[in-house]
């Protein structure tokens, strides 16, 4: 199991590969591999999605994604 | 002249019987719609909390497995729990049943008929204490069936499917399960011969072949799931891929890049893609689910490990929908018999049930159990998970 932390200004839904996955600003579990992350609706953020290869993470050192910003 | 007429008459009748003998074709899906059909998310459960998520897996093992899983269901029915301030039957908290072979009879019967499972005049009578095997053998001696079986589209498994449909499952289809709209979500597992992979009778699987599971009798799923190699012929499912507007989900596109990063995920996408080529795979041939996984734990394990499934448990935990996960593995395996090792003669087909490659449960059980327990422990150590893993003890059921 791999871990990802998505930073965002507020707490909102995060999706992985098009499916509801968790909430921003918390450490979330994901299967090892290529994934595409987005924040779903409303699309008031940029970039529209972030592509990442998730591997070699732990719960205390997750992959941190800082890319999303309000538009 | 009379004899000639008689011969012509008999030939015409038998030709008609033979030409009519065909397997019931699974219907084509008019339009792919990921929000309809037999899917976990379309099943409601008013008395079943999502926060306590209970998965049952029923293994293969013929009537022994069906009886063992029936006994477990009785125990779950009689077990009262307190959850979120309410007393409930543990049985009513079951969210998913993943089954193989003999265990699929109990799973499907409960899915369709619920409390009738426990009525001594119902399941016990129509299946558990009935000589189904004897009836199937007797049907092979029916001359009409000889002609039906001569047709290439009507194998021995079809006689079994007909019997199950008529006598056990009362001609119910997956459409009836959809109309009930209630959990538990049934995952009846067979094996795709070509890919050696699990083939589950759920709409997510049938989307790949553009077929509407709602029109498929539940008995066919159970027949495929318990379709023991050699004893029966393969159960055929038509592949209409490319005719319903199916679009690959995002996970499949992402997983196709994972050859080096995560080979098992890459392989799942590869297997799923194999169905999309309906020119090469016009028909999918199915055998007993036990060939791929005789425990029925593979699908739940993937849902525990992966985000790629519509009912992904990882996602539900991330979303804080699940507080406690319970996985009950009902395994009717027995100690392997070693009598064929006492002499030099080849065991031949009559001992096919002893062949290890038809008994995937031994190695898989150990591997899957370790994987499930490992994942649960990791979550537990992460502090966000409430489940405590009890010390595991496994003692195989004695062979009757």
Image (tube, helix red, strand yellow):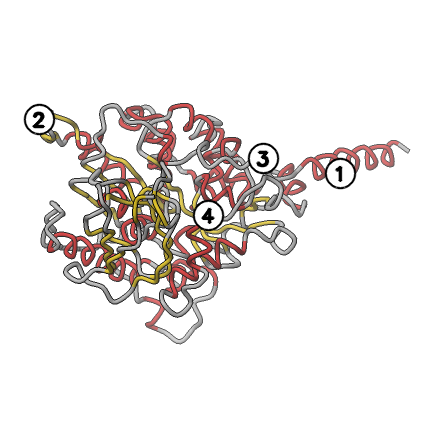
Both labels 2 and 1 in a single chain: yes
- Quadrant holding the N terminus of chain B: top right
Task: Look at 43% across and 40% down and name the residue there.
Answer: B202
Q: Secondary structure at mark 4?
A: loop
- In percent of width and height, residue A36 lies at 38, 53
Q: Which mark is residue B27?
A: 3
Mark 4 or 2: the one toward you: 4
Indicate the chain on which mark 2 is placed. Answer: B
Indicate the chain on which mark 3 is placed. Answer: B
Q: Please report whichever mark, 2 or 3, sits nearer to the chain's N-terminal start.
A: 3
Q: Which residue is mark 4?
A: B249
- In percent of width and height, residue B359 lies at 36, 59
Q: Which residue is mark 1?
A: B15
Q: Secondary structure at mark 1?
A: helix
Q: Residue furthest right?
A: B1
Q: Is residue B249 visible?
A: yes
Front one among B130 and B243: B243
In space, the residues marked 3 and 4 are separated at their CA atoms by 22 Å
Q: Please report whichever mark, 3 or 4, sits nearer to the chain's N-terminal start.
A: 3
Q: Is residue B163 left or right of residue B109?
A: right
Mark 2 or 3: the one toward you: 2
Q: Please report whichever mark, 4 or 1, sits nearer to the chain's N-terminal start.
A: 1
Front one among A20 and B317: A20
Give residue B311's quadrant in the image. Answer: top left
Task: Look at 66% across and 38% down and name the residue there.
Answer: B21
């Amino acid at each position: 199991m791999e871990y990802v932390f998505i930073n965002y200004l507020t707490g909102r839904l995060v999706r992985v590969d098009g499916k509801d996955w968790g909430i921003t600003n918390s450490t979330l579990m994901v299967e090892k591999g290529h994934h595409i992350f987005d924040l779903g609706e409303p699309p008031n953020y940029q970039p529209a999605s972030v592509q990442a290869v998730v591997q070699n993470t732990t719960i205390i050192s997750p992959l941190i994604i800082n890319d999303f910003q309000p538009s | 002249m009379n004899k000639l007429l008689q011969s012509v008459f008999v030939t015409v009748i038998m030709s008609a019987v033979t030409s009519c003998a065909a397997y019931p074709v699974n219907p084509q899906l008019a339009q792919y719609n990921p929000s309809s059909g037999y899917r976990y998310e379309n099943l409601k459960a008013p008395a079943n909390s999502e926060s306590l998520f209970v998965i049952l897996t029923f293994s293969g093992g013929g009537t022994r497995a069906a009886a063992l899983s029936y006994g477990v269901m009785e125990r779950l029915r009689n077990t009262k729990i307190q959850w979120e301030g309410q007393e409930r039957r543990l049985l009513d908290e079951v969210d998913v049943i993943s089954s193989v072979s003999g265990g699929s009879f109990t799973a499907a019967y409960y899915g369709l008929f619920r409390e009738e499972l426990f009525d001594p005049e119902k399941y016990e009578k129509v299946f558990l204490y009935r000589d189904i095997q004897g009836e199937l053998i007797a049907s092979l001696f029916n001359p009409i069936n000889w002609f039906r079986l001569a047709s290439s589209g009507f194998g021995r498994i079809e006689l079994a499917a007909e019997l199950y449909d008529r006598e056990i499952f009362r001609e119910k289809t997956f459409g009836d399960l959809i109309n009930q709209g209630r959990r538990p979500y049934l995952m009846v597992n067979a094996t795709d011969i070509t890919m050696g992979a699990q083939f589950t009778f759920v709409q997510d699987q049938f989307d790949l072949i553009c077929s509407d599971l709602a029109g498929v009798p539940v008995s066919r799923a159970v027949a495929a799931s318990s379709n023991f190699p050699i004893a029966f012929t393969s159960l055929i499912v038509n592949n209409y891929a490319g005719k319903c507007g199916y679009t690959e989900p995002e996970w499949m596109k992402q997983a196709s890049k994972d050859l080096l990063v995560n080979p098992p995920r890459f392989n799942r996408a590869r297997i799923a893609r194999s169905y999309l080529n309906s020119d090469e795979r016009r028909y999918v041939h199915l055998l007993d689910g036990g060939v791929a996984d005789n425990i029925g734990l593979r699908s739940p394990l993937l849902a525990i490990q992966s985000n790629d499934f519509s009912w992904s448990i990882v996602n539900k935990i991330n979303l804080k929908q699940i507080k406690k996960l319970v996985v009950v593995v009902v395994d009717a395996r027995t100690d392997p018999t070693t009598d064929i090792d006492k002499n030099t003669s080849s065991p031949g087909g009559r001992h096919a049930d002893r062949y290890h490659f038809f008994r995937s449960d031994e190695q898989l059980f150990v591997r899957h159990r370790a994987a499930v327990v490992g994942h649960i422990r990791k979550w537990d150590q992460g502090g966000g998970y409430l489940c405590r893993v009890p010390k595991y003890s496994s003692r195989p059921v004695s062979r009757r």
